[in-house]
Amino acid sequence: MSPREARAVRTTLMSALGALIALGGPAAALTLAFPDPATETATTTDRLASYRLPTGPFDGKVVPTTLAEGAVEAQSWRIDGAGQTTLALMRAMRAQVQAQGYDVVYECEAAACGGFDFRFATEVLPEPAMHVDLGDFRYLAATKGEDVASLIVSRSASAGFVQLTRVSSATSPLPTLQIASNAGQPQRDPVAPPQDPAPVTGQAVILSSANVADTTGLVGRLEADGASSLDDLRFAAGATALEPGEYSSLSVLAEWLRAAPARQVTLVGHTDASGGLETNIAISRRRAEQVRSVLIEQYDVPRGQVTAEGVGYLSPRASNLTPAGQQANRRVEVVVTRAE
C-alpha cells in the first residue's frame, strides 16, 4: 500500500469512528473501513453460547483460554487486492476495536502464536469463508468488561481475510456490524460459505425415510463387529465441521438407532498426524461432537443413545506420510456400546 493509500485509509477510518462515537452506546453501528473492496463471506450467531478466547501462545501442550458466555457472533470478510499485508489489516482492525473501549489482552503473529497448534485450537470459520495461511496470520484478543472479542487476519495470494468473533453478556447486546463501501470501487458478489451442519434450534428435521436401504453395509458391520468407520464423512484438514454434502451413513445409523431405543453408540473422532497431540485430540473430539449434534438435531436420534470422544492421531488406519493417507485418517468411527 502506497503512503497516499495509507493516508486515505486512516482518514476513512477516523471519519467512521467519529461518526460512531457521536452516535454513542453499545448498540451503535461499528463500521469497519477496509482499504480495498470487502465482501462479507459468513456470519454465525448464537444468542446464548460459550466461546474459549485464546489468551496466550501454544506452550507445547495447550493454548491458554478464557471462557466467555453470552451472545456469540462470528463474521468473516474477504478483502480483494493482493497488496495488503496482515500487519496493515491488523493495525486498522485494532484501532477500531480500541476506539470502542476494548482493551487488548493478547496479540501475536503466526510463529509467535504457536503456528499450527494455535490455529487449530482457535475457532475459525471454515474455508472458503475464512482462509488462514499458517505462515502468515495475526491474532488479537480484547476485553471490555464482561465482553470479549477476537480478531484473526490472514491472506492468500489474491486477497486478505478478516474474522471477528464477539461475545456480549446478556445485559450488553451485540452491536450491529456494517461494512463501509469504497466509493467508486465495484463490489464482488458474496462468496457462498459452506453449509455448516451445526446444531439447529427448534423442531428436528428427520432427513431419513422410514426404511432406509443400507447400501453402505454399515448395519452389517455394526452387528457383526460392533464398530465401523463412517467413511462417507469428509473433513478438511484441521476443520471440525463436515464438508457440504449428503451422507447416507448418517441416515442409516439414525434409522438403526431409532429402531431400538436401548441401543447406544460412541462416536470416536480421528485426525491425521499434523500438529501436536493435545490439539489433535481436541479437534477429533469436536468432529465427533459435530456428528453427534447432526444425528440429534437433524436426524431425531435421542441424545442418550449417542456419546462422542476423540483420540487424535493415535489410531491411524493409513500412512500419514501421504495426502491420501492423511485424508483416510481424518474420520469418525461409530462403536456400539450397548446392542439392545
Image (cartoon, rainbow, N blue to C red):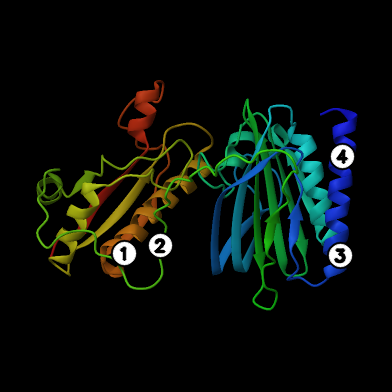
Residue topped by disc 3:
21
Name the residue: 36% across, 60% down: 293
Mark sitting on residue 287: none
- Residue 282 image offset from top left, x and y in percent: 49, 48
Mark sitting on residue 8: 4
Q: CA distance from mark 2 to mark 4?
A: 43 Å
Q: Nearer the viewer, mark 2 or mark 3?
A: 3
Q: Are marks 1 and 3 in contact (CB under 8 Å)?
A: no
Residue topped by disc 1:
296
Q: Upstream in the sequence, badge 2 or badge 4?
A: 4
- Residue 28 image offset from top left, x and y in percent: 76, 68
Q: Amino acid at mark 3?
A: Ile
Q: Are marks 4 and 1 in contact (CB under 8 Å)?
A: no
Name the residue: 61% across, 32% down: 134
Residue at the top extreme, as displayed? 322
Residue topped by disc 2:
199
Q: Nearer the viewer, mark 4 or mark 1?
A: 4
